[in-house]
Image (cartoon, rainbow, N blue to C red):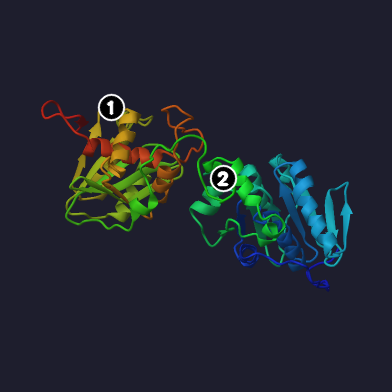
Amino acid sequence: MGGPDREVRLREITYDPLDSQKAFHNCPARYKGYSGPIGSGKSQALCQETIRLTYINPGRTGLLGAPTYPMLRDATQATLIEILGANKLPYDHNKAENALVMRDTGSRILFRPVDDFERLRGTNLAWFGLDELTYTQEEAWLRLEGRLRDPKAQQLCGFAAWTPKGYDWVYRKFVAKPTKTYETIYAKPSENRHLLERDPDFYTRLRESYDEKFYAQEVLGSYLNLNGSRVYSSFEQKDHVTELAADPRRAILWALDFNVDPMSSVIVQVSSGRVTVLDEIVIRHGTTRQACEAFLERFPKHEPGVVIFGDASGSAAQTGGMSDYEMVKEHFAVYSSMKVEYRVPKANPSVRERINLTNTKLRSAAGDIGLLVDKKCTELIQDFEQVCFKGDTGQIDKDRDRFRTHVSDALGYLIWQECRMLPQIGERSFRVL
């Protein structure tokens, strides 16, 4: 088998890429994705990228995978071999090893289903590509990331193609927070001129077959949650997300949800009943003290002071003898000179009360918007867009994604304490620490 210094014979390939496919091939990110609806040329882009990387990395090994062996054999592998045959690119196919060697470059392509992801450990890879990533477990992708370490590779690259399937791990990794390391190219609906030349009525027939939401996901390539209605149905990014700045004349309100992973909180101000969410603090495997440190890094001083809100369970003593709120009180006493007030409830409100009040703040029945969110609060925005009820029940689905609900829970505790209608007489409903 040849190496990087091998003399490689370059060949012309018959390929008229769509604009999205061109952008995908030209994308320099270490990990890149091609997100598109049905008929957007995903498999073609995946296989053409595979061939491209075998020529860029002569003599090195890569892996082409799919969620299951039938999908790999009948779709991904078949498309690649069809392209190689149509362009007369010479190769040797070892069916026993389920591998292929490109004769021009000596590069080796391993074909692997990734449903048993523990079998993906082993050989160093120069590149890997996965088809239908949204039907693949995240652990499989992570195993392959760990194998992308061939020291002789000219270009290390992990890539994938998929049709959106809600707010899953693929959305979180590639779409929610794009970085220079992870980039996604979005194929446009009806962009595939090759398909429409052969079958002009393709998308029309799908519109007649699918319901509105499924059509939006499968044909328009939209990211939707199809597994129950949204909890925060009043939220719309265009109406609620903007750039905000703290008012130096008003107290900072800090609300915490004492969950260990992630430890979550929001930083808020309220003026004339309008809630403005300035920032969020989300710490993986975090502690209460780490949350306090992060808060004081952002607001080391604030003349009007800080008011602490949050989960009533934070008043319970922990294993070490102190409650979460006692830890907060101790930390501020030692590391800050700011005035601190605590508005901690004796008991949490019902989930339904908290949700209804948050939705009312987002948009009242009269259409008034009483809650704005700074655009850097990405976890809260994802909560508002993705947290759903379980089927037709009134229960929040907390099992689908363990990262969701915590930031919005923290904000809900604050809104319930600060914005609900209170009786004119009687005992105050919060605990003073």
Q: Residue at x 51, y 57 (%)?
A: 178
Asked if marks 2 and 1 touch (Cβ < 8 Å), the reply is no
Picture quarter with the C terminus:
top left
Q: Residues within 10 Å of mark 1 (few under 14, many from 20)?
A: few
Tell whether 59 sits left or right of 302: right
Q: Amino acid at mark 1?
A: Ala
Picture quarter with the N terminus:
bottom right
Q: Position of residue 406 (x, y in %)?
A: 40, 39
Q: In which quadrant of the rendered view does residue 411 lie?
A: top left
Q: Residue at x 78, y 51 (%)?
A: 77
Q: Position of residue 131 (x, y in %)?
A: 69, 50
Q: Nearer the viewer, residue 242 or 300?
A: 242
Q: Nearer the viewer, residue 96 or 381?
A: 381
Q: Nearer the viewer, residue 85 or 312?
A: 85
Tell whether 432 sits left or right of 287: left
Q: In which quadrant of the rendered view does residue 291 lie?
A: top left
Q: Secondary structure at mark 1?
A: loop
Residue 347 badge: 1
Q: Residue at x 75, y 48 (%)?
A: 75
Write down the residue under mark 2.
215
Q: Amino acid at mark 2?
A: Tyr
